[in-house]
Amino acid sequence: MPNSDKQDIPAIEIRGVSFAYPGSEISVLQEASLTLKRGTFAAIAGGNGSGKSTLCKLFNGLIPNYYSGDFEGTVHVCGVPAEGHTVAQLSRMVGYVYQDFENQLVRPTVFDEACFAPLNYGLSDYRLMASKALDLCGLSDLRDRYVWELSGGQKHLLALAGALSLEPEVLIVDEPVAQLDPQHARQVYEVLRRLNRDHGKTVIVIEHHADFIAEYCHEVCLMESGRVLWQRPTAEALNSLDDLDRLGIQPPEVTRAAAVLREMDNARTQSDPRSSLPDRRSAGRHAAQRLPITMDEAVAHFTTFMQSGNGNLHPSPARIPASDPDHAGLSGSSSNEVIRLQDASLHYRALRRARHQVLHALNLTLFEGERIALVGNNGAGKSSLLKLVAGVARPQSGSVTVLGQDTRSVSLEQLSSGVTLVFQNPEDMFIEDSVEAEVSHCLRRRAYPNIEASVANMLRAFRLEELRQRDARLLSGGQQRRVSLAIGAAIRPEIMLLDEPTANLDLSTREELLGALEELSEHVRTVVIATHDMQLVSRWATRVVVMHQGEVVGDGTPDEIFADRELTRRAGIAPTQTAQLSADLGIRPLCRTPEELAKRIAERMWGSPNERADRPSGNLTHKEAEEHAARSQLV
């Protein structure tokens, strides 16, 4: 087939597909239809449970060839009907990197893993195919390393190399950055961009992070209740704020800030009796113009807007008052220590080395009422620190004291009555055959009172009521995350340790998580979260502990940490778009939310509401009206 004719055949084409998993009466997909052209870089977006992962399992034949539920409709992959072709046959055309990517790594070394797929197909040039895949993913120098020695980002790239080793035309990556630090997340996306741009691969990502969608994707397919609601170019998609908000999907922070400022500008223009008619018409025009979606667009956008009103600029406050609700910390924090690490070290045995040091003589004291965020790149030691505090691991030297107890002298069961650790991989917590049984398991084992009421409260708080009889292992990644949080919160511990709690969560579920933590504040004395989610850090944390190579390299408020660019670079973390944009625009202290950023810009442009109210009223002079009408508007 000539290349031109081949290029006209869609990479993916599905028509009228409905599907329900075995044992479920609810269809996860409901007459879904979608066409993706070859060479596109597409994002599949939607709320948790909308059917994103299920939709993509159509593309390599897992549905209906492996998951044999109720299936209707047609699926074509690169012009080949999925019906009548096995998963093995389709995998030559479609590579898939799963959400839990570490589970698809099955060989001991990097090169062995890259060889696995072509070797099992009996391909004689399997070594060459493996080498090409490793080279595409930038892993050639690591070919002789053991898989367990790799960082999280390197493991993700290795899973990608394994999928590429069969030289597929289509590559699907489920939640590429969910468990990666910002540095490794960008590395993965740069590899995907190179595969798409330089090698012509069709790339499909399932993604919640709109900032990565904005920078890398060509188009967005939005899912709602098992249907493809629409398919739009990225700029148009991320400006569809009503749909995104309704489905709990967060647009880029810079887009949200611009939208809030546009609303404020429109309200000011429409309500100010001194506004001229040209101003009103201009406000109506720019209301329909698109908002910035990337940092580069946002800097240019806000700089132009602020320069357009130089004559009315008001100085930004030197400091935000401590009572400002946007910067308020957790009330009730005290000097009562609940966790203390003294020269605590942790290591494990390695094959090639006698000992691999994970944590190096840590000294850290955490206090009652604090909201602590542990941040740092993959492999920095965040999860290991949580395991020390939970008693899952014991220090080889030094000591760890939790709620007055030395973790070396009390049993794990005794310690767990006051400390709950919610694992990074939700499925590690599942041992029952239904969601309801998972949430109630610990309560029943320990004979807690009012078990039914507690379970009902957790199911309601984490939107699990309709899933109560489902096997948690068969749920989507976001749904599994909600189940694990419900399990951890059910016993109402004094200390909660959460490892990447917002990974795979949509906006509405993240808000529910924050709300649940607020509700538990009367019972939970201290919360420690290991996270790569800088939005969560900015909005929630009162204290940020930065880790790098098993050591604490930074400790302060979110403002102090984000303002230290050398520290964030060294530790592989990144400030939020809001904090970065605040810095680029010269606004200090750094803003924590898009709404706060818009408010601060508005105050610099037009003064505070009280200052605007004190200005003389009445119509503008003809000269003033002309100057105001000529001023460039928010676009």
Image (cartoon, rainbow, N blue to C red):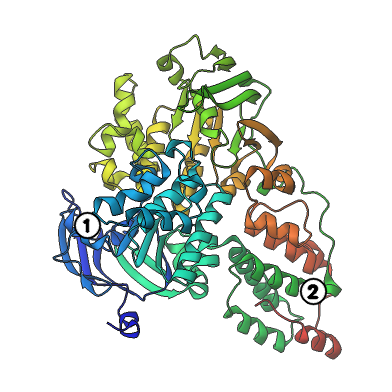
Q: Identify residue type, mark 1.
A: Ala
The quadrant where residue 543 appears: top right
Residue 410 image offset from top left, x and y in percent: 47, 11
Residue at the far front: name it.
124
Residue highlighted by disc 2: 307
Left or right, 525 with reference to 30: right
Left or right, 271 with reference to 24: right
Left or right, 594 with reference to 228: right
Observer-nearest of 453 and 408: 408
Observer-nearest of 554 and 152: 152
Residue 16 image offset from top left, x and y in percent: 22, 71
Residue highlighted by disc 1: 88
Residue at the far top: name it.
409
Observer-nearest of 28 and 374: 374
Left or right, 134 with reference to 75: right
Residue plotted at (22% across, 57% down): 88
Quadrant containing the C terminus in the rendered view: bottom right
Which label lies toward us, 2 or 1?
1
441 shown above or below 159:
above
Q: Element type at marker 1?
A: helix
Residue plotted at (65% across, 57% down): 578
Q: Is residue 524 visible?
A: no
First in sequence: mark 2 vs mark 1: 1
Q: Identify residue type, mark 2.
A: Gln
Q: Element type at marker 2?
A: helix
